[in-house]
Amino acid sequence: MELVAVVTGAARGIGREVAVRLRDAGYRVVAADISPAVGELAESGHMVPVVADVTADDAPAAVIGRAVGEFGRLDVLVNNAARFLRRPLLDTGDDDFDLLFGTNVRSVFRLTRAALPHLIASGGCIVNTASISGLVGIANQSVYAMTKGAIVQLTRQLAIECAARGVRVNAVAPGAVDTEFMAEARAADPDPAASLAVTLGNHPIGRMSTAAEVARAVVFLAAPESAGITGTILSVDGGYVAR
């Protein structure tokens, strides 16, 4: 039996690594992203790219429907698409708030709702991308942290709600990850070098994680061999939350 997965935010970084590693593990993958660059992942019979804005009203039908229409089932939903904002609360506008919650929370709610009937039918699972920012306090990340805190709690709530229906729900909580996503955020800092030094100093292993390290954790949680794991927030953070 060939398992089928949907991965959002799949054009680059963690999402791209997850999509590729699920494919390599034998899954059929629908890789969704707002960027047309997701088309680079096209691979006949194995990887289907979908250009979609996860905040759009038609996104759940477009993304989940493509997986079920193309492969006849859905076994794994990886909610990875997200936006980041490092800004003091006093400097954060309503538009910033709405944009982050629309991408990081509302889209997860709506895609999950669309996917659940198919996951119940297959006995599948959900893996959400949370963050250490949803677990501990980090200065100047108030709104971002609120969104990731919501994902942490949604993961736990859904794990309980869906357990009797055979669906597992887990999340990974990365620390700083060496991706374009992080590099772009750091470039906006007044002193990127100083910011990087602080980041590395806060991670006991002395470096950022790689996208591949986070992706391996996602694939592990998605695998049928992890059938006994649900409601878990797996930190991939170089020891950050253990301090």
Image: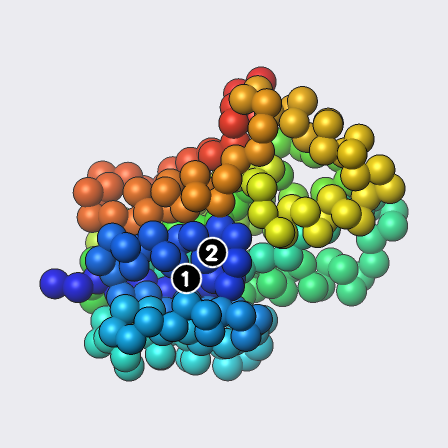
Are the residues tagged 1 and 2 within 8 Å (C-beta)?
yes
Q: Residue at x 38, y 41 (%)?
A: 217
Residue 136, how many percent across, how many down?
Answer: 62, 31
Amino acid of disc 2? Gly
Decide if residue 79 is on the left or right side of residue 240. left
Q: Residue at x 21, y 62 (%)?
A: 3
Q: Residue at x 67, y 59 (%)?
A: 100
Q: To which residue does mark 1 refer?
A: 7
Residue 242, how many percent across, how many down?
Answer: 53, 20
State the residue in front, 110 or 82: 82
Q: CA distance from mark 1 to mark 2?
A: 7 Å
Classify residue 47 by image quadrant: bottom left
Residue 170, how many percent across, how many down?
Answer: 38, 45
Residue 117, how many percent across, how many down?
Answer: 29, 69
Decide if residue 136 is on the left or right side of residue 209. right
* Residue 35 appearing in the image: yes
* Residue 60 appearing in the image: no
Please give the count of numbered marks on the rendered protein. 2
Identify the disc placed on residue 125. none
Classify residue 162 by image quadrant: bottom left
Q: To which residue does mark 2 refer?
A: 15
